Image (cartoon, helix red, strand yellow):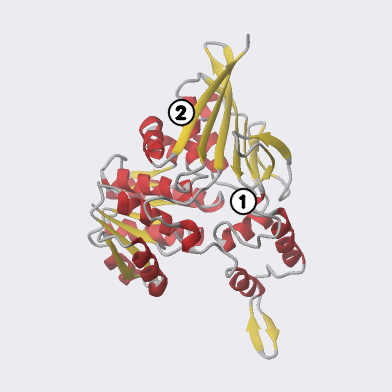
Amino acid sequence: MRIFVLGGAGKMGCISVQDLAKDDRVDEVVIADIDVESAKTVADYLDSPKISVQEVDIHDDEGFVKALDGADACLNATVYYTNLQAMEACLKAGVPYTDMGGLFYTTRKQLELHDRFESAGVSAVLCMGSAPGVPNIQTRYAADRLDTIESIKIFDGIKPPAPDDPRFSYAVPTIVDELIVEPVVFEDGEFVAKPPLSGFEDYWFTQPLGLLPMHLSLHSEVATLPVSFNDKGVKECFFKINYWGMAKEMVEKVRVLIEFGFDGREPVEVDGTSVVPREFMVSMLSGYVHSITDLLAPPKSQPPDWTKEIVTEVHGTKDGEEIIYRMGTLTCKGALPTGVAPAIAAVWLAEGRVDPGVYPPETALDPVPFFKELEQRGIITQATVTKKV
């Protein structure tokens, strides 16, 4: 089995590469990246005979499609802006596809490719990061056991870093978008936009996380779950997170930059040179991210200590009785789910476990075996069922 990891030299992609290299079902993992030096750094660090490096430029359509030749699945670990391009290449190459999410609007556009993928006999599962991804499958687990669903409430809790930690937790462009684009919620049966960083509430997570402040954020779960489970009567769905796993102080600094126009998309003249403010800001901020030694800490057989719990509360009924499913997926000493979940999906796609077409996770993947595979990586899922006395 040969898995092609587009953007495998990136901060989340390298975790996927590490997980796939350890998987006995996988024979070869291709780190496909335009940054060959970084790809070689990841390959050298992981030191696995299964890993190869291939220079790939997604803007070179012909070269990209040719590079996919022989792959059993493509895992797109790049920023979500490339999702549609990557899917088109996979469609031409006949290679199954998965990614880490499309930030709501891109996901909707990707789902429109379903008929073309189905006709071509090619499978795709979207939104397979930790979130989106895990919450979708948590919801499916609960939905399979409920007659109706009133609400789906998703809380992504991450251990806060120190107040003086200036680092971004994942892709800078994505976090900037989540800071400025209005979150969409499903409210009273309709999609509604809300102000960024609104809807604050304190939520209790499993120890050692405890009580964390949670706020709304634009996310792809809300784009698909109300649609997938429309027949169960879903009226409410939202996604909340605690400052995207960053220090509150860091988020406030970035908001100041945005307020002063550094997210502008139109070029400005600076001493005779044309500069796009957003591109300049993202380039400068990209130096404040975790290194691969943070993400793939030695000893190489043991991933770093992450503390993160993804919780989905599904309120519904069974046989007329009101029931709440609390699905909690916790990692304290396991690999970060953002890289692991799509690695599992890529293997399942390569094994032919998903029908041709384009699907969100909740309609494509079987929850119980998926959670079992997460458990093998030290990522534990527990279901708590609450009923009225």
Q: Is residue 241 left or right of residue 21?
A: right
Residue at the far top in the pictured view? 389
The residue wearing badge 1 is: 245
Does residue 96 appear in the picture of this structure?
Answer: no
* Mark identifier at residue 135: none
**Vertical placement of 118 versus 170: above or below?**
above
Q: Position of residue 282 (x, y in %)?
A: 61, 69
Question: Image quadrant of residue 39?
Answer: bottom left
Q: Amino acid at mark 1?
A: Gly
The percent coordinates of residue 134 (x first, y second) are 48, 40
Q: CB under 8 Å between callouts 2 and 1?
A: no
Q: Earlier in the sequence, mark 2 or mark 1?
A: 2
- The residue furthest bottom is 272
Image quadrant occupied by the C terminus: top right
Q: Nearer the viewer, residue 267 or 316?
A: 316
Count the marks: 2
Name the residue: 69% across, 84% down: 269
How far apart, in angstroms, are the residues tagged by discs 2 and 1?
26 Å
Q: Amino acid at mark 2?
A: Tyr
Residue density around tag 2, few if under 14, some if 14–19, many if 20 or more, within 10 Å: some
46 and 353: which is toward the camera = 46
**Residue 231: x percent and y percent?**
51, 26
Q: Quadrant of residue 75?
A: bottom left
Name the element at disc 2.
Answer: helix
Q: Which residue is mark 2?
A: 141
Q: Residue at x 32, y 56 (%)?
A: 91
Residue drawn at x 73%, y 57% as measured from the top left: 249
Where residue 130 sits in the image (x, y, percent)? Answer: 49, 45
Left or right: 230 as drawn, with respect to 256: left
